[in-house]
Image (tube, rainbow, N blue to C red):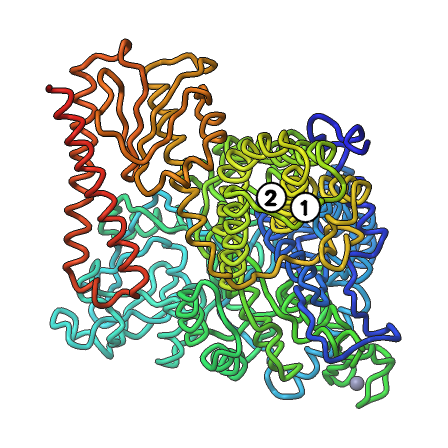
C-alpha cells in the first residue's frame, strides 16, 4: 500500500534539500561520459554550459535565480535526452567589489588597507573569501542547480591564474598589449581606473558657466565660451570654432589667454564644433574630456592634467594647487568674476558620471595604463557571428553586437587595486629593463641584479572572466576535459553583459584556442517588479528569492521565472504569480496522489487487448501533440511558451477532464479500470518528465512514488526499457508521428466537452443548485451515436439524471417550455423553464444568433479571400467545416426563436 507513504500535501521544505543531496551524492550532476573513464567515447557530442560566475561577494538576487533556473532547465533537458551534459560552476573574484568589502571591515576594526600593506591585505582578503565565498554557491544549490561541483573553479585559483598569465604574455609577445598614457575613467574615491560598465550616468541639476576667452593681442576683444566644469579651464590647451563660422573666422590662428593662469593657447578650427550649440566656441581640455582628447590628438595639442589621483588640483593648477575639484570650481569662478571675465551662469541639467561602486563623480583623466589593441581580436569575433559559427538568441541582438565591435576602443586592462591578478611585468630599478614573464623571474636577465619590482597594477576582472569557458577546463594545458568539453555549447546570460563579458569571451576564445568558445548565446531579459519598474533598494520593491523559496518553494519560483521569460525581453514579477505556481505544484501533487490511488482500484493484469474509450484516445492524442510542441519550442529556445503549454495541458485537460472521467471508468472495474489506470500512469509519467526541467523537486519526489507504486502493482505499467533510477536521469519523451486517428478523436471529444460546458454554464446562469440532477433531451443528428456512447460521462460531468437523459437523432415536435441550447449543431433541451423568463430567454438566443452570424460572415469572407488559394487544403477544409457547423447552428437558433414567439 504505497500511497500510505504519500503525504496529503506537498511539503517542499522536507523535500528539496534531501533530493538535492541525493542527486549530488549519486553523481547525477556529473557527465555520464567522463574523459577519464575506461568506456569514454570521444564521438559522443556533449552539451556544455559554463556558468556566468557570480561575484564571490554576491548574495543571491533574482538575476542569479533567473540564469540558474534557465541554465538548469537546459542542462536537465539535455541530460534526459541522454546527451553527456556538463555544467561548470564557479565564482569570480570581483576585484573592486571584494576589495571594497574587505576595506570596509578593516575600517570597522580601526585599521586600513594602507596600514596593513599589500601582502597582509591580500591574505586578509583570502581569509574573507574562505569564510564567506561559499555563501553564493550554497544559495545557487538551493535553486536546484545540477552543476558538477567537483569541477568548481574560482577566477583567482592556481589554474586560472596560470591561464591569465599565459594569455597576457601571449598578447604581449604578439605586440597586442601596450602601456601608455590614455584618457580613462578615473574613480577618485577608489583611486583606480574603472571600466565603462562601472560608470552610471545620472541626471542632476548644475550650471552652465559662460565666460570670456580674451584675445592675447587685443585685451578688448574676447570669444564667449561655456562650460559645466570651470575647474577644467586650468587644463585648456585650445579654443575651437567651426571653420565656416563667420563670427569667429577672424580669430582662427590667433591666441587667447587662459583666465588667472595667463597661459596663451591657440584658437583652432574644427568641423566637430556645433555652430548651433551654446556660444559655438569650445574650450578644449584634452586631459579631462573624451571628445577634447580626440580633438587634441588630431591637432597635436598639449595635454595638461590638472588633477591628482584624489581629484585635487595638482601643480599645473597654479594658485589652486591642493584644492578639491569642487572647491576649485567655486574659487576660480569667483576670481574670474572679480577679473571681469564672467558673462553669466545658467541653471543646467547635467549628465553626471558616477562610480557604480563608490558613488562619487568619475573624472575622465589621462593616466598611464595597460591596454589591449583590440581591433584584430574584434574583427575575428565579428566574423564568427557573421559566418554564423555563433548564433545569438534573440537574433536582433546580433546587430547590437556588430555595432559595438565595429566601434570598439582599445581595452584598458589595468586597475590600481590590490585584489586581483597582478600584472606579470617586472621592472629592474638598476638598469631599467622591463620583463614580461609567465614565471616570477629570480633576477634581471639584462644586468643580473635581483632587485626586481613587479607591476603593482592588477588586471581588470573581465580579463580573467574572458578566459572562463576554456580556463575552467584546464587551458593552457591540453587536458582531457578541454579536448572533450571545449568548445562549449551554450552561453546563457543577461543581455546587459553582452559586451562586457560575452564579446570578450568570443575574442579571447578565438585568439587563444582558435575556436569559438560556444556555438550559441541565449540572452535572457532583466526582471522588473509587477509594474515594470526596475527593482531597487531605494524604491523598496526588491523581491528576495531566498524569502520566496522559504515561503513558497523553489519549484514555484523557478516555474514563475521560466514561464514568464521570453528571450531578450524584460519580465515583470510579482509574488502573486509565484503563489499561483505554488498552487500548480500542489495540483501536480494532488493529481499524483489520485493516480497512485487509482492503481488500487484496478486489476494488475487485463484479460483482453485494450478497448480505448473516447477520453482515453483523446488524452493520449493531446499528450502526443504536447510532446511534439514542447520539443519544437525547446529546439527554438521558446522555453517559456513550452512551460505554459505543459501547464495548460496538465491543469485544463488532464486534471479537469480526464481525471474526472477516469473516476467513472475506474468504477466499471475489470479491463476498463486496468486500461484507465494504465492511461493515468502514462500521462502522469510523461508530464512529470516534461515538467522536470522546470520544477525538478516536486516532479522527482512524485515520480519516485509513482514508480514505486506502479512497480508494486504490476510490471505492465513500466516504461519501455523499465523504470529509470531517478527522474533526473530518466529519458525525455520523444515525439512520435501521428497515426491518423487522432484528429477525429480529438474533434469528437471537443464536441463532448462543448456539450458538457454549455449545460454547466446554463445551470450556473439559471442558478440551479450544483447537486441537483436534472433531465435533458439531446437532439444530435449525425452525432447521435457518438454522444450516446458518452451518455454516462455527460450525465456525470453535467450533473444530469442519467435515467432521464435522452439522446436521439431527430425530434419532430420541439419540446415546449424548455430552455434550449445549440452547440455545434447539437440541440439540447433542459426543463428549466419554470425558472426562465421568456423575454430573457429570447434575448439570450438573439445574442447568440448575432454572434454566430458574425462568425459566419467572417469565415465567408476568409474563404472567398486569397487565403483559400494559399493556405494548405487541410486548413481550408477545416474552416469550411466550421462554417457549415455555424450555418447549421444559426438555423436551429432561428427555429428556437420562432418557437418562443409562437
Ligand atoms: Zn637590470
> Closer to the camera, 254 or 90?
90
Image disc number at residue 696? 1
Residue 264, image x and y in percent? 33, 71
Q: Which of label 1 and label 2 is nearer to you?
A: 1
Farthest top residue in view: 834
Label 1 packing within 10 angstroms: few (<14), some (14-19), many (20+): many
Q: Residue at x 59, y 83 (%)?
A: 176
Image disc number at residue 102? none
**Quadrant in which the C terminus is drawn:** top left
Q: Residue at x 22, y 38 (%)?
A: 889
Q: Residue at x 50, y 68 (%)?
A: 366
Residue 334, image x and y in percent? 34, 46
Residue 738 seen anywhere in this rendered image of the structure: yes
Cα distance, mark 1 to mark 2? 9 Å
Residue 547 seen anywhere in this rendered image of the structure: no
Instruction: Mark 1 or mark 2: name the one nearer the start of the chain.
Output: 2
Q: Is mark 2 within 8 Å of ligand 1?
A: no
Residue 273 located left or right of residue 384: left
Residue 34, compared with residue 100, is above or below; it is below
What kind of element bears circle 2?
A: helix
> Closer to the camera, 411 or 18?
18
Residue 843, image x and y in percent? 17, 22
| Residue annotated with mark 2 | 558
> Closer to the camera, 87 or 802?
802
Ligand 1 placement by image quarter? bottom right
Amino acid at each position: 500500500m504505497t500511497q500510505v507513504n504519500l503525504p496529503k500535501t506537498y511539503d517542499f521544505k522536507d523535500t528539496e534539500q534531501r533530493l538535492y543531496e541525493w542527486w549530488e551524492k549519486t553523481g547525477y550532476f556529473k557527465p555520464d561520459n567522463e574523459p577519464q573513464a575506461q568506456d569514454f567515447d570521444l564521438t559522443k557530442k556533449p552539451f556544455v554550459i559554463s556558468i556566468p560566475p557570480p561575484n564571490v561577494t554576491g548574495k543571491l538576487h533574482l538575476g542569479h535565480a533567473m540564469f540558474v533556473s534557465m541554465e538548469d532547465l537546459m542542462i536537465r533537458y539535455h541530460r534526459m535526452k541522454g546527451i553527456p551534459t556538463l555544467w561548470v560552476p564557479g565564482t569570480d573574484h570581483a576585484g573592486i567589489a571584494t576589495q571594497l568589502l574587505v576595506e570596509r571591515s578593516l575600517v570597522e576594526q580601526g585599521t586600513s588597507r594602507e596600514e596593513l600593506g599589500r601582502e597582509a591585505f591580500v591574505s586578509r582578503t583570502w581569509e574573507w573569501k574562505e569564510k564567506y565565498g561559499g555563501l553564493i554557491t550554497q544559495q545557487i544549490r538551493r535553486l536546484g542547480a545540477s552543476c558538477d561541483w567537483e569541477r568548481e573553479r574560482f577566477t583567482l585559483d592556481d589554474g586560472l591564474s596560470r591561464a591569465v598569465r599565459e594569455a597576457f604574455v601571449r598578447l604581449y609577445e604578439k605586440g597586442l598589449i601596450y602601456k601608455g598614457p590614455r584618457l580613462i575613467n578615473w574613480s577618485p574615491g577608489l583611486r583606480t581606473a574603472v571600466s565603462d560598465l562601472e560608470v552610471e550616468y545620472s541626471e542632476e541639476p548644475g550650471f552652465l558657466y559662460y565666460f570670456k576667452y580674451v584675445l592675447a593681442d587685443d585685451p578688448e576683444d574676447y570669444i564667449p565660451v561655456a562650460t559645466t566644469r570651470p575647474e577644467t579651464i586650468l587644463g585648456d590647451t585650445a579654443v575651437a570654432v567651426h571653420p565656416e563660422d563667420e563670427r569667429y573666422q577672424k580669430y582662427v590662428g590667433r591666441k587667447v589667454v587662459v583666465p588667472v593662469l595667463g597661459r596663451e593657447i591657440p584658437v583652432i578650427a574644427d568641423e566637430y564644433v556645433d555652430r548651433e550649440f551654446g556660444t559655438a566656441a569650445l574650450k578644449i581640455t584634452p586631459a579631462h574630456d573624451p571628445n577634447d582628447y580626440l580633438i587634441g590628438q588630431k591637432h597635436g595639442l598639449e595635454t595638461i592634467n590638472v588633477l591628482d589621483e584624489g581629484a585635487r588640483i595638482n601643480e599645473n593648477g597654479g594658485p589652486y594647487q591642493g584644492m578639491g575639484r569642487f572647491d576649485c570650481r567655486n574659487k576660480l569662478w569667483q576670481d574670474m568674476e572679480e577679473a571681469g571675465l564672467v558673462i553669466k551662469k545658467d541653471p543646467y541639467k547635467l549628465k553626471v558620471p558616477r562610480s557604480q561602486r563608490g558613488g562619487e563623480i568619475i573624472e575622465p583623466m589621462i593616466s598611464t595604463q595597460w591596454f589591449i589593441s583590440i581591433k584584430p581580436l574584434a574583427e575575428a569575433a565579428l566574423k564568427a557571428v557573421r559566418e554564423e559559427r555563433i548564433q545569438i538568441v534573440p537574433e536582433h541582438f546580433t546587430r547590437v553586437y556588430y555595432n559595438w565591435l565595429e566601434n570598439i576602443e582599445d581595452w584598458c586592462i589595468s586597475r590600481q587595486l590590490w585584489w586581483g591578478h597582478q600584472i606579470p611585468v617586472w621592472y629592474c630599478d638598476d638598469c631599467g629593463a622591463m620583463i614580461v614573464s609567465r614565471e616570477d623571474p629570480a633576477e634581471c636577465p639584462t644586468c643580473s641584479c635581483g632587485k626586481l619590482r613587479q607591476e603593482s597594477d592588477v588586471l581588470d576582472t573581465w580579463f580573467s572572466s574572458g578566459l572562463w569557458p576554456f580556463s575552467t577546463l584546464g587551458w593552457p594545458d591540453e587536458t582531457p576535459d578541454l579536448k572533450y568539453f571545449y568548445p562549449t555549447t551554450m552561453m546563457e546570460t543577461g543581455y546587459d553583459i553582452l559586451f562586457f563579458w560575452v564579446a570578450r569571451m568570443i575574442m579571447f576564445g578565438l585568439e587563444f584556442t582558435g575556436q569559438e568558445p560556444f556555438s550559441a548565446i541565449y540572452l535572457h531579459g532583466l526582471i522588473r517588479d509587477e509594474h515594470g519598474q526596475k527593482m531597487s533598494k531605494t524604491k523598496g520593491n526588491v523581491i528576495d528569492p531566498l524569502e520566496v523559496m522559504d515561503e513558497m518553494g523553489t519549484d514555484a519560483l523557478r516555474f514563475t521565472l521560466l514561464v514568464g521569460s521570453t528571450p531578450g525581453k524584460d519580465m515583470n514579477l510579482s509574488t502573486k504569480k509565484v503563489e499561483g505556481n505554488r498552487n500548480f505544484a500542489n495540483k501536480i501533487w494532488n493529481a499524483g496522489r489520485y493516480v497512485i490511488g487509482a492503481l488500487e482500484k484496478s486489476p494488475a493484469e487485463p484479460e483482453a487487448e485494450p478497448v480505448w474509450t473516447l477520453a482515453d484516445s483523446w488524452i493520449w492524442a493531446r499528450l502526443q501533440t504536447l510532446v511534439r510542441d514542447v520539443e519544437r519550442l525547446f529546439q527554438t529556445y521558446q522555453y517559456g511558451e513550452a512551460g505554459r503549454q505543459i501547464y495548460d495541458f496538465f491543469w485544463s485537460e488532464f486534471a479537469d477532464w480526464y481525471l474526472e472521467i477516469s473516476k467513472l471508468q475506474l468504477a466499471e472495474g475489470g479491463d476498463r479500470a486496468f486500461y484507465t489506470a494504465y492511461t493515468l500512469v502514462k500521462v502522469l509519467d510523461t508530464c512529470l518528465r516534461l515538467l522536470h526541467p522546470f520544477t525538478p523537486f516536486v516532479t522527482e519526489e512524485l515520480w519516485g512514488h509513482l514508480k514505486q507504486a506502479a512497480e508494486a502493482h504490476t510490471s505492465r505499467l513500466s516504461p519501455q526499457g523499465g523504470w529509470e533510477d531517478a527522474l533526473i536521469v530518466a529519458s525525455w519523451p520523444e515525439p512520435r508521428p501521428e497515426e491518423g486517428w487522432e484528429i477525429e478523436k480529438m474533434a469528437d471529444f471537443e464536441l463532448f466537452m462543448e456539450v458538457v460546458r454549455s449545460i454547466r454554464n446554463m445551470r450556473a446562469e439559471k442558478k440551479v443548485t450544483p447537486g441537483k440532477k436534472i433531465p435533458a433531451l439531446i437532439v444530435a443528428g449525425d452525432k447521435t451515436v457518438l454522444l450516446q456512447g458518452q451518455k454516462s460521462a455527460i450525465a456525470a460531468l453535467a450533473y444530469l439524471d442519467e435515467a432521464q437523459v435522452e439522446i436521439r437523432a431527430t425530434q419532430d415536435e420541439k419540446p415546449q417550455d424548455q430552455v434550449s441550447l445549440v452547440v455545434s449543431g447539437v440541440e439540447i433541451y433542459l426543463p428549466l423553464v419554470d425558472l426562465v423568463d421568456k423575454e430573457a430567454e429570447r434575448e439570450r438566443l438573439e445574442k447568440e444568433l448575432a454572434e454566430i452570424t458574425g462568425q459566419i460572415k467572417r469565415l465567408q469572407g476568409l474563404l472567398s479571400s486569397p487565403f483559400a488559394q494559399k493556405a494548405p487544403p487541410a486548413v481550408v477544409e477545416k474552416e469550411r467545416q466550421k462554417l457549415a457547423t455555424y450555418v447549421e447552428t444559426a438555423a436551429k437558433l432561428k427555429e428556437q426563436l420562432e418557437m418562443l414567439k409562437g
